[in-house]
Image (spheres, rainbow, N blue to C red):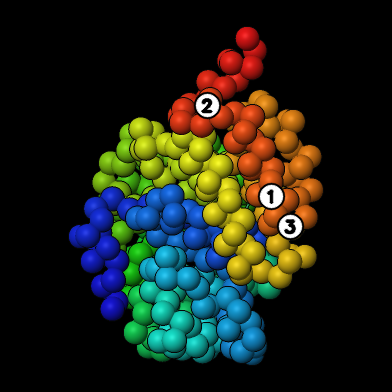
Amino acid sequence: MKDFWKKQIKEKGKLVFLAPMDWYWDSAYRQSVKNIAPNTILVSEFYSADWLVHSKFLADSVLPHASIEDPLIIQIFWKDPEMFAKAAKIISNPKYNIAWIDINMWCPAKKVVRSWHWSSLLINEDTAFEIVRKMNEATHLPISVKTRLSFDWWQDLINFAKWLEKAWCSLLTVHWRTAKQAYTWIADLEPIYELQKHLNIPVVCNWDILNYDDWMSKVNNLAWFMIWRWSFWNPWCFLPWDQHPTLLEILNQMEFHALKLVESKWEHKWNLEIRKHLVQYLKNFPWVKKYRKRLVTTESFESTKKTIEDIKLEFKDDLNKRPSLGEIEKKEEI
Ligand SMILES: Cc1cc2nc3c(=O)[nH]c(=O)nc-3n(C[C@H](O)[C@H](O)[C@H](O)COP(=O)(O)O)c2cc1C
């Protein structure tokens, strides 16, 4: 089981991950991504190890998932190794069928860093290694770490990563900005290629990757990559450009996503969740303005379906086109 990722590389070659994103990537979104790009590996948003240990209700709400999401990685955060180990035991209960556990050593938010969680583990190295070691003792599942370049300068990371590898970390995802740089730094992949040369475990690159084609132009010695922001704006970013969808496929995908949300959430919560996604699916089409209000105020699955049907009717001549940036836009201008 610990060499799970090796099998994945063997079966699938270059791999792509959907990066974890708190508040956006629930089960319905993850199912939607898998429906589009079945080879994508999904990482859950972060959950507190402490909550998972103390709330059976939380564990039973967030760990069960649809089979289309497999293999699913669960990401957790906390600060002390014992709590991580207890959470690892709970997550590895076979009834949840989780593929592997990822540790969040990424988040730079000041209040959590001050309390020695998340990216502060980069400067609290002994605890970081102990967490990985104790988790490996507690579970048969592979353990990975998602981190940053470093807390404030990159040279730290090679040694830190080597120690994580020694503690049986199976894979390392790196977002190549320091905690202090947050999102304000332009991508330079050279240091990530360099890091991979020093490790036997795979390094996953997570940083400003726009899409599959962008990744293929940067792949170099790295096997895997991880996309966050661009998948929200374009869920087809995991596929080569020539596999991007027709307008009909986009509209059907919106309905699929809405349906999965209805199945997994209470009605009032459903509205809030789907509204933020629907407009994103169509955001490249200028005519979406006309439908924006209906999409962002939708009240039920029926009203979402009706809006999608109305769009299909209005653009019936364009449904089989692959709207690469603005075909329909041009038509509207005429
Ligand atoms: C709102 C928001 C929520 C996020 N939630 C998580 C999370 O739960 N766990 C995590 O490791 N990273 C989280 N991230 C970071 C992303 O997974 C990713 O590392 C980062 O956005 C860089 O990737 P990108 O350049 O492809 O966007 C979050 C980022 C944002 C903006």
Task: Report the amino acid beneath label 3.
Answer: Ser
Task: Report the amino acid beneath label 1.
Answer: Thr
Secondary structure found at label 1: helix
Query: Counting other residues with Cα less than 10 Å from the Cα at mark 3, is it few (<14), some (14-19), or many (20 or more)?
Result: some
Residue 22 rendering spot, x and y as whole percentages? 62, 61
Query: Counting other residues with Cα less than 10 Å from the Cα at mark 2, is it few (<14), some (14-19), or many (20 or more)?
Result: some
Q: Nearer the viewer, residue 202 or 291?
A: 291
Residue 171 rendering spot, x and y as whole percentages? 35, 64
Residue marked by disc 1: 304
Instruction: Report whether the residue tagged 1 is closer than 8 Å to ligand 1.
Output: no
Q: Is residue 176 visible?
A: no
Residue 94 rendering spot, x and y as whole percentages? 40, 86
Q: Using residue 248 as the reference point, say whether residue 214 is left or right of it.
A: left
Query: Counting other residues with Cα less than 10 Å from the Cα at mark 1, is it few (<14), some (14-19), or many (20 or more)?
Result: many
Residue 243 rendering spot, x and y as whole percentages? 37, 37
Q: Mark 3 touching mark 2, by CB under 8 A? A: no
Q: Which mark is residue 318?
A: 2
Q: Upstream in the sequence, badge 3 or badge 2?
A: 3
Alpha carbons under labels 3 and 2: distance apart: 27 Å
Residue at image coords 67%, 38%? 310
Image: 163 above or below 237: below
Task: Report the amino acid beneath label 2.
Answer: Asp
Residue at image coords 29%, 66%? 5
Q: Mark 2 touching mark 1, by CB under 8 A? A: no
